[in-house]
Amino acid sequence: MSQQYLTPAEVEAIAREAHEGQRDKAGRPYAEHIAAVAEGVRARGGSDEQVAAGWLHDTVEDGVLSRTWLDEAPLPQSVKDMVLALSKGEDEPLEDYTRRILATPGARLVKEADLAHNADPARLALLDEQTRERLMAKYAKTRALLGLPGGAP
């Protein structure tokens, strides 16, 4: 008997509902970010599993869905693995986080799409200068640790 997984539309609906009412640092609806990440994964040639991880990438980290929910969700194990790899612990060193992403098949592409949207100049322009500069440095360091173009020298 084969496993019945959530459809792409169901994954999107769950992610949108989980982040309902959340706002990003610029005050925009958080659903815009997760939609942009999922589309960025798709545009980079990502698999259906990677697109699903794009929709869900911040759910466990942000605490809007529990680890138990993820463990029990009817999702391929690869999606669960990517979501967990992309869930940075509160005090986790960036180096440990990026090593885990690199060790998890498919996760690097999802993080690349996440970083691309986070570092979008139009999005960053909505932030105060101090926050913008701090985040730009953080994103550059993350890109460098992941071996992505545009990383810090």
Image (cartoon, rainbow, N blue to C red):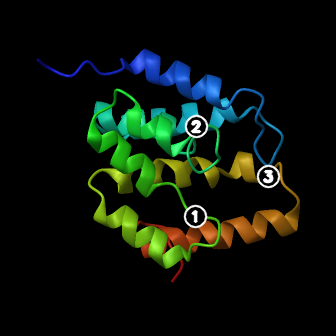
Residue at 30%, 30% in the rendered image: 48
Of badges 2 and 3, nearer the viewer stands 2
The location of residue 105, given as percent across then percent down, is 26, 54
Residue that label 3 marks: 125
Q: Which residue appears farthest toward the bottom when viewing the image?
A: 153
In this rendering, does residue 22 appear at all? yes
Q: Quadrant of the N terminus?
A: top left
The location of residue 51, given as percent across then percent down, is 39, 34
Residue that label 2 marks: 65
State how many labels appear.
3
Q: Which residue appears farthest toward the left when viewing the image?
A: 1
Residue at 38%, 72% in the rendered image: 99
Task: Tell me which label, 3 or 1, sits earlier in the chain.
Answer: 1
Task: Tell me which label, 2 or 1, sits earlier in the chain.
Answer: 2
Residue that label 1 marks: 89
Q: Nearer the viewer, residue 31 or 118?
A: 31
